[in-house]
Amino acid sequence: MSSAVHSTEEYDMDIRSLSSSHRHPQDAPYVHKVGLPPKQNLFKEFKATVKETFFADDPLRSFKDQPRSKKFILGLQAIFPILEWGRSYSFAKFRGDLIAGLTIASLCIPQDIGYAKLANLDPQYGLYTSFVPPLIYAFMGSSRDIAIGPVAVVSLLLGTLLQSEIADPVANAAEYRRLAFTATFFAGITQVTLGFLRLGFLIDFLSHAAIVGFMGGAAITIALQQLKGFLGIKKFTKKTDVVSVMHSVFASANHGWNWQTIVIGVSLLSFLLFAKYIGKKNKKLFWVPAVGPLISVILSTFFVFITRADKDGVQIVKHIEKGINPPSVNQIYFSGDHLLKGVRIGIVAAMIALTEAIAIGRTFAAMKDYQLDGNKEMVALGTMNIVGSMTSCYVATGSFSRSAVNFMSGCQTAVSNIVMSIVVFLTLQFITPLFKYTPNAVLSAIIISAVIGLVDFDAAYLIWKIDKFDFVACMGAFFGVVFASVEIGLLIAVSISFFKLLLQVTRPRTAILGKLPRTAVYRNILQYPEATKVPGVLIVRVDSAIYFSNSNYIKERILRWLIDEEELVNKSSQPKIQFLIVEMSPVTDIDTSGIHALEELYRSLQKREIQLILANPGPVVIDKLHASDFAQLIGEDKIFLTVANAVAACSPKLVEEV
Amino acid sequence: MSSAVHSTEEYDMDIRSLSSSHRHPQDAPYVHKVGLPPKQNLFKEFKATVKETFFADDPLRSFKDQPRSKKFILGLQAIFPILEWGRSYSFAKFRGDLIAGLTIASLCIPQDIGYAKLANLDPQYGLYTSFVPPLIYAFMGSSRDIAIGPVAVVSLLLGTLLQSEIADPVANAAEYRRLAFTATFFAGITQVTLGFLRLGFLIDFLSHAAIVGFMGGAAITIALQQLKGFLGIKKFTKKTDVVSVMHSVFASANHGWNWQTIVIGVSLLSFLLFAKYIGKKNKKLFWVPAVGPLISVILSTFFVFITRADKDGVQIVKHIEKGINPPSVNQIYFSGDHLLKGVRIGIVAAMIALTEAIAIGRTFAAMKDYQLDGNKEMVALGTMNIVGSMTSCYVATGSFSRSAVNFMSGCQTAVSNIVMSIVVFLTLQFITPLFKYTPNAVLSAIIISAVIGLVDFDAAYLIWKIDKFDFVACMGAFFGVVFASVEIGLLIAVSISFFKLLLQVTRPRTAILGKLPRTAVYRNILQYPEATKVPGVLIVRVDSAIYFSNSNYIKERILRWLIDEEELVNKSSQPKIQFLIVEMSPVTDIDTSGIHALEELYRSLQKREIQLILANPGPVVIDKLHASDFAQLIGEDKIFLTVANAVAACSPKLVEEV
């Protein structure tokens, strides 16, 4: 190694003496060596990789250098953040939480009843899911703004998946319910496991574009499902795709629609949409759309009770079981055929639920500028679903619409979830019988007005503007959900996202660099048309780590740049290409296939009498170039700190020969 | 847009006037604008992406600007390269090809008989596979050095896969054979399809490290399988893992071993290994190991014939069908249960066969410096397998050992394959009966000495030196094959390779930059310990495209760098961090999730009163920053061409305030 250092130093001297006679002195002000980072030992390297992969957020940071008792308290606080923020809780904060909690409770009660139907469960199960999970989350979660409970998309997904296993949720209600609890249990287990193993980054593989498309498609599907209650149709398809649903709707147009139901539905939907419009126009009136659903439930229930419209075919809720969640531990399948089905459905539901909750949590955390530990959140969400599955709840997660209301109502901490939970408890205990005459049409109207916000045209347009490939993923997910099923939409979204990642590592970009006038800076000549090529030198930048998946492509692409350039040069009788400089700044890593490709490139260039020169290899790359003896092969004096230095070293030689 | 340009220009003026009063004038010599590339239309962009993905090698380059008749000839030549190189074929070249062809023929005949056994087929099927496919390849292939025929690894793989479908290849010989032809047919279809759809890059997903491990494991497995013939064991396991095989070997130690067989086997193996050693020591004697197998076959056959050792339990070949390949079109399953099995096996065999052939082709093409079109090669290899499946051949590909001999014997073109094919034809027609007394032990010895070269310790050591993660993939594949099965080894290899790619796009590297003394260059302070941080400024480089899979990580990582730095700064009472410069040179692309992450980063920084500054975004990125209005959000004057420019713009302000 010492001889290598020596030769590089000699070379430096050489360059400095050359540069004095050079035309552009600023091109080679001072040639710095390429740094070879201190050799790391294997264990350290391994530890660093594991740390960045699984503990990127350094969760144990606060535990450092603390006495053992303090560590114990910190550990408890890490699991139950309420112990931390609870100590500084004040009456002022409680005022905010109380108002927010009451507001989201008024919103969640009618939504819960409707969402339970999407999951093919009786209405009380929706309310159960708004009672236990929010309580658990309040103790373990670290988001201050999320509103926990059943949500439309997960309810639909769960309903679809469960129905594909148990075809008739009415005839086999008990079995269906048991499978639902089993799926919820394993959804919780999945979430806790992901969080505990710090595999939270897996949910990042669902791209933003795919989520926008999936959510939009799910919203349309859910809205279409509501046509059943909205039009008072009795015979309705069990499929969710738009073709089957529309067929159902029109097939029953002559005899199956109920005009009284339609009148109730249309007028309430108009009311709700108008309330939404008011809330949007004037941010101070945000509570109008928030309490709209409850008001419409009260009004329509009263109306049906007075007119006894249910005798004219207006479908009503009829019955909601009174009392709080019964235990359901003994209903979970821990063996047999249904176990595997429950696990499979649970995993899918868990991922979608996580995606939604984490997206919400991050959005509001960014708005109020606090940190959210995704993995800790997963443990909290998973625990609440495990406990939920034992208390007759189905999969709960953070709701987009209610979290936004929570935020705008001025919630301060997760106490607003506790307030909501208490209101739901009181509802279950005392007022469920009052829902008897609530028409299904009002629930449909509430669901439609809630999910309509999930169709995000602005986001889709922005995606179109920014990245066409993302837009394809978005539309693929959207149309997959609308025309096939939620599962297929999800599959399309994930596949397209993965394909994009693979494309990135298979076909990285390369660019020809030129010198920007009056600088020593070399940039892509397509981006900077004013940049000029250096005669006799071809400068190529490789824009990716060189791995087995792209090493051949990169080698061949560089050779093709060279052939193109040589053709150009021949036509215009410029000096022949004698140097190929590969700018390696963006090459963050290289593997054995990559080294082979460089060796092949070097040999091909040797045959053409062109000198290969590398500029600015990073720490990992330079380390590997030395480990593989490639640096020795091309000569250590052919590796430069910057393109400008490399060009300075080539140019005088070119000048001599021309 | 014009106003934006205007403001940037104004800013430039500003900087230049500032820089005159600056301490280091070389830090800001001339501030160049960040180039916004000319707006491309959507169709052009799409076309460019498709071209780089599928036509990266520009196969139609030579067709440009040619008259139609010329295009037709060029097209024919593209499909049948023999029409191109055949025109300049000469007697001098033929001499080389003749010698090379005879040498590889002498090597392939005994190997073929042995390899057919690995695939559980009768010996003549190995010879058939060395007759038709090389002929087809000679007309369509573009490699000059590859030697086509059956190979050990593919034979083993095919044998294992077929046996998992048809348990007893002896009892159901006809059915087994038909499935083998079906698999070969669909292997050919797969290869042609991949080549035709220009999906050749898919085989790049098997990393070099994984191939080294897989080949090594397969070689060990094949060698262990030979213990049956080598020791003369009659009852032998059908599994291929080392535990089962060793159990079989030792269980039969008392009564199943045949000492005469062992004597023949050991002495011939010693002879073959010695021949190999001679060939390695003295490159001129390369023909010694090449003709070794044929000599040992002749000697051992003669010996058994004289001594009638077969009566003492030495197993012999007994019978090889005389005559050339019978047609087998009508034996391929085109319907029923076996069709699907054949397709599945065919696809796996096709990929491994391609991997081997393309790796060989590329290696020798690089040595002789000619270009090889991977996709065209696939069409050639696929066609030869389709024709092969109709003429009683199983999957053929390029053989590592024979191609090396071919190369060293001085082959010039694919004519050496034709010569070999003719020799095999003569063998099939006239001398197969002579193989009657050939002992199986000699075939085992030949196979062991052939596959031993596939265990590449040097390559494994190099992988260990260069990349520990690659080494894990390599060992995973190796032990998977040795201890489980070829399929599981393959699965492990592919999974680990993919995991590595995903890791790259999920956890990209980031680095803190410092200024190198006496330059305007900013580099990773871990690589260049002499680089110094600029007071009040934190410079972070992001080493990857910012996509949905890593956008959150990158945002959080940058904030963590900031927190770490602020802690340091507080301790040492240095000036507070006021600027965060993100060096974006390696950020080749950004998607909507990435833009969101940047927006969140910007907001978090705003709350801390830190200014976000971007340096050197590439063409795609700057385009998307504008499309998403993020450039307007942070201010276009916060985007600089280089880190040096950005620092120059920050520093005077810092100076004012301190």
Image (cartoon, coloured by chain):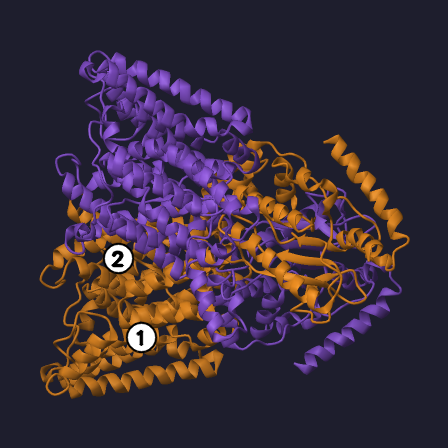
Chain colours: A orange, B purple
Q: Which residue occupies the extreme front position in the image?
A: B91
Give the side of residue B385 with respect to residue B419, left or right: left
The kind of secondary structure element at disc 2 is: loop
Count residues near mark 1 (Cα–Cα under 10 Å), then give few for <14, some for 14-19, many for 20+.
many
In the orientation shown, which residue stands out farthest toward the right? A21
The image quarter in which residue A483 lies: bottom left
* Residue B253 in the image, given as x and y percentages of width and height: 24, 14
- The quarter holding residue A238 reads bottom left
Q: Is residue A78 visible?
A: no
The N terminus of chain A lies in quadrant = top right
The residue tagged 1 is A220
| Residue type marked 2 | Tyr
Q: Chain of mark 2?
A: A
Residue A262 sits above or below residue B72 on the image: below
Residue occupying the point 50% across, 66% down: B60
Looking at the picture, how far across and down is residue A233, in whole percent?
15, 79
